[in-house]
Amino acid sequence: MDLRNRIIKINRTYKFSKILKTFLKYINQNKNKLWLNSLISSVLRILFRFKLAFQLFYTLKKSKDFKSMDVFWIARIGYLRRIKKIPFLEFDSYLSNHSICCCDLTHLPLEPNSCQAININYFFRYFPKKNLNNVFRSWKKTLIPGGLVRIKVTLKHNEKKFEKLKTSLIKNNFFIKTINEYDLKINGIITLEAINQKKKIRNHKGILREKLKDLLEVLDQNKNEIQKANKICVLGYALEPIKAYLYQLNLNSPNIQYFESIKDLSEYPEDYFDFAIVANFLEYIDKPSNNQVFSCLKKILEPKAKLLILVPEKRNFISKQTAQLYDKGILLELLDEINLTISWMNLSNSFRLIQVLLKNKPYFPTKKYNVRILLLGVYSLRYTFLNNGRWDSQARAFERLGYNVRILEIKDNSFDYFIKYIKLFKPEILWIGSKVAYDFLIEKSEFFKYNDIKVVYWMWDITTFEPYNFEGIIDYMFITSGGEIPLYKKSFNVEKVYFVPAAIMPEIIHGNEYIEKKYDIGFSGQLSFNHPWYIERTLNFELMKKHYEVKRFKNIIQNLPELYNQCKIIFGGTPYFKDLEYYASNRPYVALASGCCFITNYFKGLEKLAKNEVHLLWYHTKDELISLLEKYLSNDQLRKKVAENGVKLAREKHNHIIRIQNMMDIINGKTEKFYGFID
């Protein structure tokens, strides 16, 4: 049984709150039976009093599926609503919280170095009298080096406990990163973030042979950028092999300086170097030192100078000296904090290193528009679910365009909290993504009817809702299917509904020419003979498997572009919706931006989005599908030409900046057109 099915089974079996509701309903219907009421109340009190008996009721510790998944988990404890996506796991010591795992919260059922963050709400309710040193010692083993603990506490009547909490964190070698008091004005909660540090970082000795091989391969692939530079600085440990490699390049620049510490680097004057390489370094310094490193690099590099960073991906090349572990999301969040412009980020062709090329200029503008925008959605996925980029692309585009943006995670707070936050921030626009806030808008409809806030709802996939009169509540709706515009207008009584599909981030979603093609065809998505949406797609998938080497990618949350680049052609489409005008998920845009030749079923209006056998391939019948595959799999030149045109189309017409600007232009009355149609 895979993890997803296991989770579903647990939730169906142990929804304790539903049992409670059934009891209470029965009590209300039989109020005259006092003896029965007393008996039930006594049973419930006993259950809660002896809750410790349930703490190890179910554990995923011995689950093979749980261990084998190559992700850094994020543990969530005590939150109102679950995030039903990998890598999030919901823990609780009570069966009533709909958690995935009911367990002893001091000893989470996770492997050592497997968790990138532990987020806990109502900390002192879970640990009222616990020895906090034992808690943090246990959590420290579970967290990856550089992992984060995010603790929310109600400060009122807990001031002394909060001071003890901070003391205990410091004692267990956690670095207190931030203490956010903004929510004190709203619900009396304070949020503390602390970083898991190593007690002592050992002196670094040498580079592993396999790691050195990968580092030199990446440098060789970027030698054109390196050769353009005049003054180069290289920061890292055990640099002799890298020094020898750069010497062999016969660079035009004789001025190459090598550093093993920030102290030596900081002695150079401002704007001195025009290129920098950081390799075999960041993984061996404590996370709090990152700001110092990049502040120094920004100072000694010329404006717009380039910076190449190389770090191991996840647990590759991990050793006792490792002080930080990275995946793309962790590194991207760090780079956003230091505000450097990202040219591109991807995995090396060995899939063991992350490489990123930066420019020494601010990525997000320092000057902001006066327009205040509040983004509401599942922004916990911003740095953990980069394949579709839906959450990150929205936030990143608004920030890049210079709007005054605040972000709210809908899964973490109550609807009353959101209203209080809105009243405090006073946004001109409330921007909602996907289907996550449907119930919120209904429950708080009176507030929005009598408020000047513009409510914008962006639905980026086929969504089934109960009809509701949103007149005066939702001002603009953007949907991924032009064919559903009349349906949305009628079902929700919203006049301004426009076709605007999902977007891509070229910095993250792009090709890698150095990755070897292993498969003829690749696919990532749902397959099923039981769901009507996927039956024909599944039949086509099975047909292709009979003729070609086909690879299906499952449970991939970050590195899909690199996996796509292992395939000559990417398969997609949902024939069930072929008569729905302009409908497609984000799959075509991700595949095109990844530099792949993409094949899909024809759907109504597709010719306005792309040209057949120019930007992508489309088919009408199974015979045509096989014929096109035969033609383009046997001709590398033709296939590469289509892929090149597709990349250009995705970057020019479907990037995240253009998408958000398109919608803002519609809201501001500048246009009613979709900018993604081809001429």
Image (cartoon, helix red, strand yellow):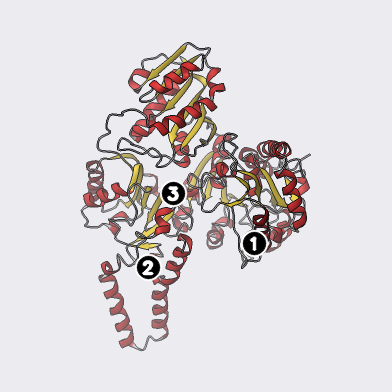
Q: Please tell me which residue is depicted at 50% across the width and 26% down the height of the picture.
A: 219
Element on which disc 1 rests: loop
Q: Residue furthest top?
A: 254
**Can residue 176 be seen at all in this image of the molecule?**
yes
**On the rendered structure, is 396 left or right of 119?**
right
Q: Which residue is mark 3?
A: 71
Q: The C terminus is located in which quarter?
A: top right
Quadrant hosting residue 228: top right
Q: Are marks 1 and 3 in contact (CB under 8 Å)?
A: no
Q: Please tell me which residue is depicted at 34% across the width and 27% down the height of the picture.
A: 206
Q: In the image, what residue type sits under mark 3?
A: Val
Residue 612 pos. (x, y %)? 77, 45
Q: Nearer the viewer, residue 162 or 46?
A: 46
Compared to residue 31, the image places residue 247 above or below, namely above
Element on which disc 3 rests: loop
Q: CA distance from mark 1 to mark 3?
A: 27 Å
Q: Please tell me which residue is depicted at 24% across the width and 43% down the height of the picture.
A: 172
**On the rendered structure, is 483 left or right of 160?**
right
Residue 276 pos. (x, y %)? 46, 22
Precedes in sequence: disc 1 or disc 3: 3
Judged by depth in the image, the label closer to the viewer, 2 or 3, is 3
Q: Which residue is mark 2?
A: 96
Q: Which residue is mark 1?
A: 534
Q: In the image, what residue type sits under mark 2?
A: Ser
- Label 3, residues with CA under 10 Å away: few <14, some 14-19, many ≥20: many
Q: CA distance from mark 1 to mark 2?
A: 35 Å
Q: Are marks 1 and 2 in contact (CB under 8 Å)?
A: no
Precedes in sequence: disc 2 or disc 3: 3
Q: In the image, what residue type sits under mark 1?
A: Tyr
